[in-house]
Image (tube, rainbow, N blue to C red):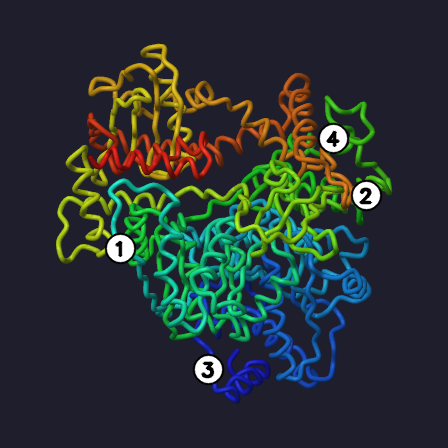
């Protein structure tokens, strides 16, 4: 490729800007110029976008060396798929600047939920040469009548932040769209290039992406050093009885100097509700930051989000308090420092956030870890060790998502229709559906055509018609309903929030707002708002001067600890019993807590499982500490309770956090050296899960999402969405009908499988039990609560008490235990 017109043009342009390409960028350019496919893996801030985008430009210049500055292809050349709307604007800006300076008359367009109707119409008439699009909007493109003509010209499809899409149903949408684009040009398919941060299964990530092309391609790695500085914020006093969430905001004064010393700081919070609280707490601690501080999360209205992103680019903001909405690839070069509040729950997420700072070659990424309770400092030490060992989480791809496939078939049916035989082979060219059998495909198409065994009498479920040797949707009503919900991947029902006098503020989850009464004050986008009324899926509010407000909580705010971080966490306790000057400072400052834990019970090593049995006024407690994450502990608590009840009839209540779980009973719990290994055996695990957990009820809730994605439930017209409880009622009715009249229904089977794989984490649960069988189980009988079990006990109280009463109760407990 070196010496080609395209390469020489790009090198000349970069040299004029005093830049030189990295080796991995040149490697990617060569592959793309030759029409090859692959995956680029490079640290944040080293030009991953240019490695793919400029490859496409070089290829075009090489094909038209004489007139590339005067001619326009007038057809889509590069399709750029990005998971976040926030990324699109940043990427488009960088591309437009490069094209303008190179004198190439290409247009760059953006297509996502923020694109105006006028711009969409222009794109329908004529697509730009580069289109930056989300997975959902790409499927909307496939629902247009002339999509084959628009997409046949594509020479390169780039999938940005592929690691973020992999392992989700949005990733499955990308897989299906790629299979269609490849099928449009079977003899000369476009190249596919992924752009990914490091994941534990990078080879598999590429295989999944390139499956429609036979999985052939190359991983282009940037072997570049990325300096990272990880620092911890320490409380003045280590509480010997910590509890989750209480410490974070009390340390706000300690981060003000960090913010002042940095040009720009991002403060990452795990939940949107706490983002609102931190924004206010920083303003209260440093009022002079007013005007230089902003808030950014997914529920804030688009204009404010865009303003924050633009101000970050310009360097006019001192600090932005944000959630995962700013996790991914946006290039904010003024950002010097990142503060992570609370556990990020995973190594990859921590690295991703750290990479938001020092977002340029050679710069140091600086991240501070601020604990929300003392024990989280052990996680800070675990993160440092995991990063040194490059122990990054894998993202297993989703398999056999029949709901997404049903939606996709209807998308093709409303545009050009589809031939079931050819589409079957096309769908099987994806990683997700490679094992799809002919019988399953026949069931899926029959289900869309006639409603299957149970729904054939209902017109709404007879969607497809057989016309001109193809399945089509000809009903205008059915087609419109489907187009309104193309790309739906279910999240919690959201309501718009507006002032009574006009003006859009953001969105809020239905389940939160439905608990409030008119007159209640809540916080959103840094404003205190009084609820006036809810009307037509809109929350009407007015400004409030009240100093007290309710901070919204968003579902899904509690992410479980990753397997890798759990493993490193267990390893840190090996040092706790033998701390010295070489030990990590995070562990040394926790010495008082570890000493008390050893005195009352035991500090478990990596090859040990600690079980504490304690009797209090509340009853008999069994605390178990596998350090495997909330979801695994929830499942294990239910299984253990079931297995113990077979020894002696006994009832339990459960509590759990990421470190362990509690079983509480009003009678002694029969667990001792004679039966403990059998109670934690992996034998009959699948059956015991089904017996111990109401898997049918869990599957019923999971089925609601599957039914919505698969198009069995219509969510309503814009502005008239059905309430969550109505959707659940409709889904429950369908679930019951299928269980009774169509027990082999593939969607029913999928609901149970998703419960076991995602909610119960059955594979990780089995791995944990097998590890315990090889470990030493340490049974202790403390005379009072220990530093390890105290946070679990507090979590069990959260369900019963308001936050103020909870704090009072905890203070009393801490005083009693300290005596």
The quarter in which the C terminus is drawn is top left
Q: Which label sits in the foreground, 1 or 4?
A: 1
Q: Where is residue 623 in the image (x, y as percent from the top left)?
A: 30, 29
The residue at which mark 2 appears reads as 479
* Cα separation between marks 2 and 1: 62 Å
Give the distance between the C-alpha atoms of the residues marked 1 and 4, in whole angstroms: 66 Å
- Left of 459 or right of it: where is 666? left
Residue sitting at x 71%, y 55%: 184
- Contact flag, marks 4 and 2 (Cβ < 8 Å): no
Which tag is nearer the camera, tag 2 or tag 3? 2
Q: Which comes before the other along the chain, label 2 or label 3? A: 3
Q: Which of marks 3 and 4 is in front?
A: 3
* Residue furthest top as drawn: 649
User: Where does label 1 land, which residue?
Assistant: 236
- List the residue tagged with mark 3: 20
Q: Which of the two discs, 2 and 1, labels the residue nearer the N terminus?
A: 1
Mark 1 and mark 4 lie on one chain; the one further toward the N terminus is 1
Q: Nearer the viewer, mark 4 or mark 2?
A: 2
- Spatial distance from mark 2 to mark 3, Cα to Cα? 51 Å
Q: Mark 4 points at which residue?
A: 446
- 782 or 710: nearer the eye? 782
Of the two numbered discs 3 and 1 in the rendering, the one whose residue sits closer to the viewer: 1
Distance between the Cα atoms at labels 4 and 2?
18 Å
């Amino acid at each position: 490729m070196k010496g080609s017109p395209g390469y020489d043009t790009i090198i000349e342009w970069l040299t004029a800007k005093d830049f030189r390409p990295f080796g991995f960028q040149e490697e990617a350019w060569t592959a793309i110029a030759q029409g090859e496919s692959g995956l680029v893996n490079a640290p944040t801030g080293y030009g991953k976008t240019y490695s793919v985008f400029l490859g496409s430009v070089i290829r075009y210049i090489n094909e038209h060396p004489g007139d590339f500055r005067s001619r326009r292809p007038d057809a889509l050349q590069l399709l750029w798929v990005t998971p976040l709307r926030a990324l699109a604007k940043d990427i488009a800006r960088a591309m437009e600047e490069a094209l303008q300076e190179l004198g190439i008359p290409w247009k760059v367009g953006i297509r996502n939920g923020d694109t105006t109707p006028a711009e969409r119409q222009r794109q329908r008439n004529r697509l730009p040469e580069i289109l930056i699009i989300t997975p959902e909007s790409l499927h909307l493109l496939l629902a247009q009548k002339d999509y084959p003509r628009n997409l046949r010209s594509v020479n390169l499809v780039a999938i940005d932040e592929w690691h973020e899409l992999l392992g989700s149903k949005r990733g499955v949408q990308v897989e299906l769209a790629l299979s269609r684009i490849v099928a449009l040009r079977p003899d000369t398919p476009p190249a596919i290039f992924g752009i990914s941060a490091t994941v534990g299964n990078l080879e598999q990530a590429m295989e999944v992406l390139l499956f429609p092309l036979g999985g052939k391609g190359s991983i282009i790695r940037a072997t570049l050093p990325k300096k990272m500085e990880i620092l911890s914020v320490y409380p003045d006093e280590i509480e010997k009885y910590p509890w989750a969430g209480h410490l974070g905001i009390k340390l706000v004064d300690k981060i003000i100097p960090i913010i002042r010393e940095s040009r720009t700081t991002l403060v990452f919070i795990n939940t949107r509700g706490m983002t609102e609280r931190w924004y206010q707490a920083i303003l209260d601690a440093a009022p002079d930051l007013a005007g230089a501080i902003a808030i950014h999360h997914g529920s804030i209205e688009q204009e404010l989000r865009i303003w924050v992103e633009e101000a970050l680019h310009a360097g006019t903001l001192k600090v932005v308090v944000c959630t995962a909405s700013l996790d991914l690839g946006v290039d904010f070069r003024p950002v010097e420092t990142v503060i992570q509040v609370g556990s990020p729950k995973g190594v990859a997420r921590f690295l991703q956030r750290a990479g938001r700072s020092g977002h340029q070659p050679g710069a140091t990424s600086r991240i501070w870890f601020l604990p929300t309770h003392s024990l989280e400092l052990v996680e800070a030490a675990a993160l440092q060790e995991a990063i040194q060992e490059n122990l990054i989480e894998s993202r297993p791809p989703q398999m056999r998502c029949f709901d997404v496939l049903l939606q996709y078939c209807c998308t093709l049916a409303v545009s050009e229709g589809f031939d079931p035989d050819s589409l079957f082979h096309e769908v099987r060219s994806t990683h997700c559906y490679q094992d799809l059998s002919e019988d399953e495909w026949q069931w899926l198409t029959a289900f869309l055509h006639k409603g299957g065994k149970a729904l054939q009498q209902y017109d709404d479920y007879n969607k497809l018609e057989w016309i001109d040797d193809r399945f089509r949707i000809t009903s205008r009503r059915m087609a419109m309903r489907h187009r309104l919900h193309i790309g739906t991947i279910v999240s919690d029902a959201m309501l718009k929030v507006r002032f009574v006098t006009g003006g859009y503020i953001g969105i809020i989850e239905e389940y939160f707002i439905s608990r409030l009464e008119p007159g209640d004050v809540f916080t959103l986008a840094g404003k205190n708002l009084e609820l006036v009324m809810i009307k037509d899926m809109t929350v009407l509010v007015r400004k409030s001067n009240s100093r007290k407000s309710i901070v919204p909580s968003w579902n899904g705010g509690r992410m479980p600890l990753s397997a890798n971080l759990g493993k490193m966490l267990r390893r840190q306790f090996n040092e706790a019993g033998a701390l010295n000057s070489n030990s990590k400072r995070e562990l040394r400052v926790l010495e008082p807590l570890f000493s008390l834990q050893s005195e009352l019970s035991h500090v478990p090593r990596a090859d040990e499982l600690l079980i504490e049995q304690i009797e209090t006024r509340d009853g008999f407690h069994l605390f178990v500490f596998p350090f495997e994450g909330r979801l695994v502990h929830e499942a294990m608590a239910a299984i253990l309770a079931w297995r113990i009840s077979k020894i002696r009839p006994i009832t339990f209540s459960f509590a759990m956090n990421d470190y362990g779980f509690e079983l509480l009973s009003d009678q002694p719990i029969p667990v001792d050296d004679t039966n403990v290994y059998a109670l934690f055996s992996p034998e009959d695990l699948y059956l015991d899960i089904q017996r111990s957990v109401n898997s049918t009820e869990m599957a019923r809730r999971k089925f609601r999402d599957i039914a919505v994605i698969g198009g069995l439930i219509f969510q309503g017209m814009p502005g008239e969405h059905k309430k969550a409880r109505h959707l659940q009622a409709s889904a429950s009715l369908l679930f019951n009908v299928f269980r009774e009249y169509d027990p082999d229904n593939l969607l029913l089977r999928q609901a149970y499988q998703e419960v076991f794989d995602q909610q119960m984490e059955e594979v990780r649960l089995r791995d944990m039990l097998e590890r315990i069988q090889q470990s030493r189980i340490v049974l202790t009988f403390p005379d009072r609560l220990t530093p390890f079990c105290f946070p679990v006990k507090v979590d069990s109280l959260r369900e019963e008490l308001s936050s103020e009463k909870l704090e009072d109760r905890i203070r009393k407990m801490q005083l009693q235990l300290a005596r």
